Image: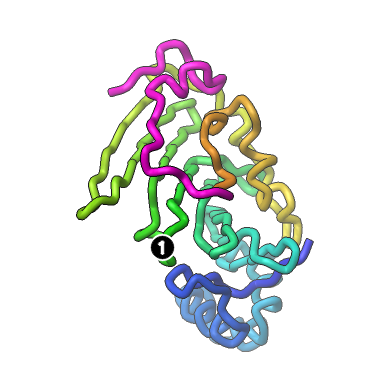
Amino acid sequence: MKFDHRIYNSLMLSIMNEKNSLDDIKDLVAGDIKKEVWKIHGKSTSDWAKYAAANNLWYPVTVYKDDMPQCYIIISKEFIEVQFLDERMFGYVYMAYKKMDSEKMFLSNVYVREYYDRKNKPLQDLKKDIDMIFSVEGGLSVTTRHFIREESVKVIEDNMEATHPVNVSQNWKSIPKYGEYDEISNYGDIIKPGDLLRDIDTSLKSPVAEDDEVDPDSTKENKWLTPDWNKN
């Protein structure tokens, strides 16, 4: 696996260089460490990441596939966040894990974006997003937004909530050690056939037609959901 510790800039849609990444990391962690610590461990983004990983502090990871950024990971004291990037450097799948103890973490949020592939800015190109919130007890709420782009943008929002606990056993993962990001850097290994995203195309390899319709029953056979899954 190829990775480094430079920062992903979502506004510039690029991975920042070493110097700018190091400057931003310094600003972000300044309140959590003494100046002497940064002098010793802040000589490079890699030096900082190794120290941060050993001391449960904030650090970034950019994972590459075929020399292209595949995902951007933020590891902090309480959370691990993973954002998957497409060829345009748009974020299209976001996952947030809450650290539950020193070894285990729980996938509490999955956010998926679908684009038209027409604009060069994510928010201007967004067609649909799906925001899923999980609880350890099996609670699940899903908010889906469709962005109809005509003369003005029209947003259609649909909110759903499970009336009974869903199976969240696969949401539990081991907290990755430094350099061991394989499991969380491939969403295909996490979002498996039969789970909540079985009917969502997360590949986003081809443009989506404007006249695509949403099947209101698209989740009725989903193995994550109980027969009592209902719209609010």
User: Does residue 42 appear left or right of residue 157 in this picture?
Assistant: right
To which quarter of the image does residue 85 belong? Answer: bottom right
- Residue 89 spot, x, y in % from top left: 54, 64
**Residue 222 part of the magenta segment:** yes
**Residue 96 part of the magenta segment:** no
Q: Nearer the viewer, residue 143 or 151?
A: 151
Residue furthest left as drawn: 152
**Image quadrant in which the C terminus is located:** top left
Neighbour tally class for label 1: few under 14, some 14-19, many 20 plus, Cα within 10 Å:
few
- What secondary structure is found at the residue carrying circle 1? loop
- The kind of residue tagged 1 is Lys
Residue where numbered disc 1 is placed: 119
- Residue 217 spot, x, y in % from top left: 42, 19
**Image quadrant in which the N terminus is located:** bottom right
- Residue 184 spot, x, y in % from top left: 66, 49
Q: Nearer the viewer, residue 175 or 212?
A: 212
At horizontal 36% and vertical 26% (from top left) the residue drawn is: 161
- Against 89, is 188 above or below? above
Render colour scheme? rainbow
Residue furthest right as drawn: 1
At horizontal 32% and vertical 22% (from top left) the residue drawn is: 231
Which span is picked out in magenta? 205-232
At horizontal 61% and vertical 62% (from top left) the residue drawn is: 56
At horizontal 50% and vertical 32% (from top left) the residue drawn is: 136
